[in-house]
Image: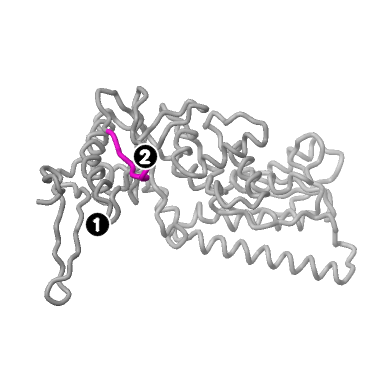
Amino acid sequence: MLVYILAWDDKGPSKIGIAADPKKRLKGLQTGSPHTLSLKHIEPVGVAASAIEREVHRALAGRRLPGGSEWFDLPPADARIAVRSAAAAAGVLFDETATFDSIHQKSVFRWLDEQARRRALRDEDDEDYDEDLPELAPPSPVELIARTLDAPKAGRYRFSDYLRTWPEGVWLRWAFERLGRKTPDGRRLTPYLEADKYLEERDAKFGRNIHDRWIEWSASRDLSRYEAETLTSVWNSFIGVHNLLESRGDPEPVHGIHDYVDNVHLLSLCGDPKYKDPECLIFWHDDFRAVVIPDKPVTLYSINMGAIAKLFPVENVAVSGFVAPAFPRNIWQRPFLPWLKGAEKRRDAALGAFINNPDKRYPTTEKREPQDGDGLTRVRISLDCPDEHGYF
């Protein structure tokens, strides 16, 4: 597919659309038009055509002509800048070597060049300069990619269920309430983008990673019964060690903080009765994020006056849930398309390795005491049989 620009003349208006054969499309449009149309620009963008068209139409919404058409009140030269800017960001969709950093940098440079051209026209009082031209800020490649991806075709759980396991979910709900809207059903991205824009306009520091979350969610799937039950058993084994470490209070764990099992971060999330959210468990790995949801209300933790969190097992309750790939920490520095193509495979491989590993590393603790010189005495808590002091 190709993105094309048609116009009556060099002053516009301009039509921005997509077609496999723009010249054939021009002939069809000319038949019903009282004006002589000409093809002003073609951008060969492959699979990114739909994403670019949507991004350009969104960016130029203020210049759209009445009737909700693809015609915009601006010269074809400016329409071309908008298309090229979006194409620069969307390049990651058809370039196997493109990283978010490189794509975003190209987009920014195109935008800076256009801003410089406009300043020159303004300074020269050029008659082609239009004071009302919208600022064509470079679109985020993450947002553009998110717009191309659909929610999972099947699955019990919605994007809203996944989003609430991240801090931005709380902020986006706040935005919907301020906008006087109900929280969306979680199958379309557009409503969330509107709430995200509301937060951006108020310089919110949180709730702004909606695109990342949608990209992850697009490759999610429901957990199998075996997976959900096995993850629950990991949680039930983990809480004994966690509670013991919390009650001791002082020693630091050998393998990081208390809530890690075999390089997987374990979290418990309380439910919100206002939104009918159940409590759930979160297992967060570099390659996956699994969410286990009990089918009946349970209590996962309590916090006493000393701010010590005590965890509780999940017993005699059926569980289910879903799993999504996790964005790697270096996503902006690595080719994105290969990551996207292999996300589901890596997700399932990492989840399977974790579930089926019989020798998981649960939290342990060390007590540091000076010996002759700088030696350390290490006392580890046993998962199976600590004594009353928590020592071997």
Residue at point 75% right, 37% down?
Answer: 69
Q: Amino acid at mark 2?
A: Ile
Q: Nearer the viewer, residue 95 or 257?
A: 257
Residue at point 37% right, 47% down?
Answer: 343
Callout 2 crowding tier (Cα within 10 Å): few <14, some 14–19, many ≥20? few
Instruction: Count every numbered label the image shows and give the total.
Output: 2
- Name the chief secondary structure element in magenta: loop
Q: Which mark is residue 208?
A: none
Q: Which mark is residue 303?
A: 2
Give the quadrant of residue 354.
top left
Q: Which residue is mark 1?
A: 251
User: What is the span of residues highlighted in magenta in the rendered image?
Assistant: 305-312
Q: Amino acid at mark 1?
A: Pro
* Disc 1 element: loop
Residue at point 52% right, 44% down?
Answer: 168
Give the quadrant of residue 183.
top right
Q: Is residue 124 above or below residue 85?
A: below
Question: Which colour style is shown?
Answer: one colour
Give the quadrant of residue 120.
bottom right
Q: Position of residue 46 (x, y in %)?
A: 55, 49
